[in-house]
């Protein structure tokens, strides 16, 4: 066990956990932030995507000991009122079916647009290819990313 | 107007308590307290509700709360079912707040999500509920104003008396209306007067989904809750022999390790109580990561299980089912299927004289198709919360059919049903997997043993290797053509492990004079169950590829050939019990032909494949346009036509069809589970290939047949024909027919 003070969504959060604990479980079990989802635990599905200093990372592969002073943003902190352009675009296109993968999709899309504000169709497909949607909402995901890019 | 006599049982179904203040509200539950809708906050809901029927509550502020009876797994029922009520109630959708209902089969009906039945099953009852409440409101206004009931009208949540220009909001009359008797005669709207149904409405949980609110079973929390995981045998056909948990128990956060029997010998299992493994080795601890890690330190001995008997509740009383011993491998399963396919099979249907037709045929075409076991791979792995005490049980989580689970849970816990509360969380996918409640029973038994609230979690690996899979299937099709290339005989012999896939009374039964359908099955210890459009998802692949090949041999366009057969089936059907409507079947083919600009197998750069199918009371057809991209076949464009009667929420329905198409392409290309000595070879998404973003088509154009027929299924029907259409396009692209799924066999070869 070890004590950490993490910067999550702009706030310091203290926890006392095994240093090997992936951020996914720190968020879900220790900090009661369940918006970050568990899908595979092996960096294959993207359901657990969060931002580490603005870059999309798989929180299931990020041990808490590796975070240090870096800023973590989760879906709970992407915007204050759920009105990030990506979230708004997701609602406009009514993307979700079951919805389980969508927070990970949104976090990946938001990070993608930050480094590439005007992505081509190929950029979007490649950028979103690490996020599985078992319900098959890929077409709407692409459209929503395009809409968010416009705003 | 449609006049309906409410039946006695229907009335009790509609009527609930007239108490003001939520007798049915889940105010103390996890849902309502922690997760109140933003919409509710925004509207500043008062404490005071007037409950009109089990589904509907109206506040003095004219806010209408509608309970969704059925669990939501992505099929949009939380939006579309309340839309049906709101339509007949005649309220402004803006003022509607939706909440998942409690589990209460007496008040809210069957509450079963599956078989593409939600909208179909609830269409009439929910319309009646809405219409009954509207009439009670009109009666309340009529009495208050001392005016004749017949002169009271409504519009968008307001009552009017045009003659006197009196008007009042529903909210002003809700309290009085709640005391009115439920009307005996209810008038339902004509389809042409619909103003909510058939107009696209956004997912009522959209905002919560995009902000990551705790909606799913895996998100459920309770004070003092522990986490439990189960170690299951490494292979089907094995069971627990002994274990040593000393190392595990030393790990931080671990509370206990024990083994537990799911069902005692002779326990009578319900129809959906399919059991994977009966001896559970359970690790319980404080957090998920701690339990996941500590579980790895278990020293476990497994042993072959031998033949086992299960007692299942059957239609005609109890029946004993023998589950055979053995460690099965995909290669031996294939050989066994080939062997069984040669044996005499059970005759399922026979028309005319098929033997003579084949004897006299100028040409006989014979093809054999196979498809592998499939894992459901719901994005949210199986899980369930349970808090069981000697007095009562609260269980919560993602489950498609809570009503079917309750009797078994009651027996397992020795608690009467009224002491059991089942809460329905949103499901991160279902696809049939969550109709089998074993994980819920496991959670409850673990909680009972631990005397603590627990959440049982399957890891992805558990979920994939501890499954209730789509069976493995094969079918041999034969067609007899006469010298003029007319189809004079048709024969299907299908089988599988462990069930036979053949739907004997489906097309082309009824369209061919001489027809024979046969089936067989091979018992197995690999657990199987419903998977999005059970059996159909194989049949549509095999039969629709075969018909494509037959059309080619007949020298006919594949759509025209099907339409000719369907015309025959419509005008002069062969045999009885044909379970499809030939005109509606033809309708989707014509629609997809016209919308896709079908012109045979080619359209510019595209190689085209077509297929159609009927299942779950609906009709679907697709034209799949394939190209070669980076040396690989790629479905770039799809046209879909669906006839499911009235489409309640069109944009959500389009989403569902698009999802079915993507799912179908993914499974046709990549899906497949391989066994080796009983062990599932794919344990996670690195080995089990799911379709990804860049592999989905660029466009999927969805068209619905416009009619006023009562709605039928939508979640499943568009899925099966995708396989056939992909197979047929693949032939046009590669020049080669594909008979074995998955078509890109990286996933299922080993
Ligand atoms: S849970 Fe991290 S990528 Fe799947
Ligand atoms: S919406 Fe269900 S997994 Fe993506």
Image (cartoon, rainbow, N blue to C red):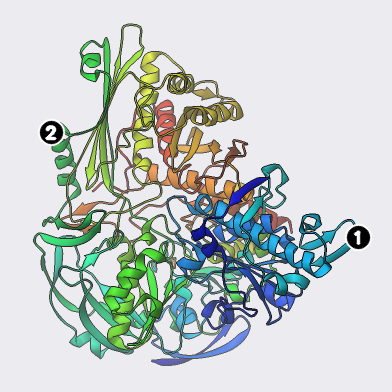
Q: Quadrant of residue B137?
A: bottom right
**Residue occupying image coordinates x 24% and y 19%:** B354
> Is residue B685 something that shows in the picture?
no
Left or right placement of residue B412 versus residue B289 in this view: left
| Residue furthest right in the image | B164
Left or right placement of residue B328 versus residue B223 in this view: left
Which label sits on residue B317? Answer: none
The residue under label 1 is B164
Q: Nearer the viewer, residue A27 or B102?
A: B102
> Is residue B373 something that shows in the picture?
yes
Q: Nearer the viewer, residue A99 or B185?
A: B185
Residue B737, position as x, y percentages in the image: 34, 28
Say yes or no: labels 2 and 1 on the same chain. yes
Give me the C-alpha separation between circle 2 and circle 1: 81 Å
Quarter of the image that includes the N terminus of chain B: top right
Residue B562, position as x, y percentages in the image: 44, 23
């Amino acid at each position: 066990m070890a004590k950490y003070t993490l910067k999550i969504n702009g706030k310091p959060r203290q926890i006392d956990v095994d240093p090997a604990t992936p951020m996914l479980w720190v968020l879900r079990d220790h900090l009661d932030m369940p918006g970050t989802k568990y899908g595979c635990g092996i960096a294959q599905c993207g359901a657990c995507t969060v931002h580490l200093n603005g870059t999309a990372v798989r929180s299931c592969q990020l041990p808490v000991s590796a975070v240090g002073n870096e800023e973590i943003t989760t879906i709970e902190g992407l915007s204050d009122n759920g009105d990030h352009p990506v979230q708004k675009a997701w609602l406009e296109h009514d993307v979700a079916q079951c919805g389980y993968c969508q927070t990970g999709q949104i976090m990946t899309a938001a990070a993608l647009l930050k480094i590439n504000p005007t992505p081509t169709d190929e950029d979007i497909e490649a950028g979103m290819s690490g996020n599985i949607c078992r319900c098959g909402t890929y077409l709407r995901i692409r459209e929503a990313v395009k809409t968010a890019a416009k705003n | 107007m449609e006049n309906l006599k409410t039946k006695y049982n229907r009335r009790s179904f509609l009527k609930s308590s007239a108490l003001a203040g939520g007798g049915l509200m889940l105010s103390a539950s996890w849902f309502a307290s922690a997760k109140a809708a933003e919409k509710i906050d925004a509207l500043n809901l008062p404490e005071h509700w007037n409950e009109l029927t089990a589904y509907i509550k109206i506040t003095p502020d004219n806010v209408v709360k509608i309970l969704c009876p059925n669990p939501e797994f992505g099929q949009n029922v939380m939006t579309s079912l309340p839309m049906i009520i709101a339509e007949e109630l005649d309220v402004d959708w803006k003022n509607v707040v939706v909440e998942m209902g409690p589990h209460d089969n007496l008040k809210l009906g069957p509450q079963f999500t599956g078989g593409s039945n939600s909208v179909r099953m609830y269409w009439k009852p929910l319309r009646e509920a809405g219409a009954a409440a509207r009439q009670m409101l009109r009666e309340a206004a009529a009495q208050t104003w001392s005016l004749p009931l017949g002169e009271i009208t409504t519009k968008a949540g307001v009552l009017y008396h045009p003659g006197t220009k009196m008007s009042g909001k529903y909210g002003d009359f809700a309290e009085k209306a709640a005391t009115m008797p439920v009307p005996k005669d209810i008038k339902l709207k004509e389809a042409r007067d619909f103003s909510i149904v058939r107009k696209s409405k956004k997912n009522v949980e959209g905002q919560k989904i995009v902000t990551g609110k705790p909606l799913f079973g895996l998100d459920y929390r309770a004070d003092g809750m522990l986490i439990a995981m189960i170690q299951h045998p490494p292979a089907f056909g094995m069971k627990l022999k002994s274990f040593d948990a000393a190392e595990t128990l030393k790990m931080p956060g671990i509370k206990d390790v024990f083994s537990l029997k799911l069902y005692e010998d002779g326990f009578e299992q319900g129809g959906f109580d399919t059991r994977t493994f009966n001896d559970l080795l359970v690790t319980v601890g404080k957090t998920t990561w701690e339990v996941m890690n500590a579980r790895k330190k278990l020293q476990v001995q497994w042993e072959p299980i031998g033949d086992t008997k299960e007692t299942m509740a059957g239609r005609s009383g109890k029946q004993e089912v023998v589950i055979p011993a053995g460690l099965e491998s995909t290669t031996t399963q294939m050989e066994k299927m080939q062997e069984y396919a040669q044996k005499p099979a059970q005759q399922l249907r026979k028309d005319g004289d098929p033997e003579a037709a084949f004897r006299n045929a100028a040409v006989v075409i014979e093809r054999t198709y196979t498809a592998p076991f499939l894992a459901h791979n719901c994005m949210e792995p199986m899980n369930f919360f349970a808090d069981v005490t000697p007095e009562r049980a609260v269980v919560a989580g993602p489950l498609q059919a809570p009503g079917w689970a309750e009797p078994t849970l009651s027996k397992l816990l020795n608690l009467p049903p009224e002491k059991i509360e089942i809460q329905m969380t949103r499901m991160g996918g279902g696809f049939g997997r969550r109709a089998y409640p074993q994980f819920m029973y496991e959670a409850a038994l673990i909680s009972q043993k631990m005397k603590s609230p627990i959440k049982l979690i399957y890891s992805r690996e558990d979920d994939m290797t501890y499954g209730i899979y789509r069976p493995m299937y094969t079918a041999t099709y034969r067609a007899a053509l006469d010298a003029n290339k007319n189809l004079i005989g048709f024969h299907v012999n299908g089988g599988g492990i462990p069930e036979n896939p053949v739907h004997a009374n489906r097309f082309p039964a009824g369209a061919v004079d001489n027809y024979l359908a046969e089936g067989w099955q091979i018992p197995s210890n690999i657990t199987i169950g419903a998977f999005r459009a059970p059996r159909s998802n194989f049949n549509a692949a095999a039969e629709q590829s075969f018909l494509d090949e037959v059309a080619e041999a007949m020298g006919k366009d594949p759509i025209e050939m099907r339409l000719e057969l369907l015309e025959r089936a419509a005008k002069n059907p062969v045999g009885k019990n044909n379970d499809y409507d030939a005109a509606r079947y033809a309708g989707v083919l014509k629609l997809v032909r016209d919308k896709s600009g079908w012109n045979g197998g080619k359209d510019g750069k595209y190689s085209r494949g077509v297929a159609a199918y009927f299942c779950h009371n609906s009709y679907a057809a697709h034209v799949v346009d394939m190209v070669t991209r980076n040396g690989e076949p790629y479905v770039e464009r799809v046209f879909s036509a669906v006839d499911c009667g009235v489409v309640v929420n069109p944009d959500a329905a389009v989403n569902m069809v698009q999802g079915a198409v993507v799912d179908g392409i993914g499974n046709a290309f990549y899906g497949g589970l391989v066994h080796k000595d009983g062990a599932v070879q794919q344990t996670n998404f690195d080995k089990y290939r799911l379709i990804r973003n860049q592999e989905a088509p660029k466009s999927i154009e969805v068209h619905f047949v416009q009619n006023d027929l009562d709605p039928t299924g939508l979640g499943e029907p568009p899925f099966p024909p995708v396989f056939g259409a992909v197979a047929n396009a693949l032939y046009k692209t590669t020049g080669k027919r594909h008979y074995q799924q998955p078509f890109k066999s990286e996933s299922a070869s080993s």
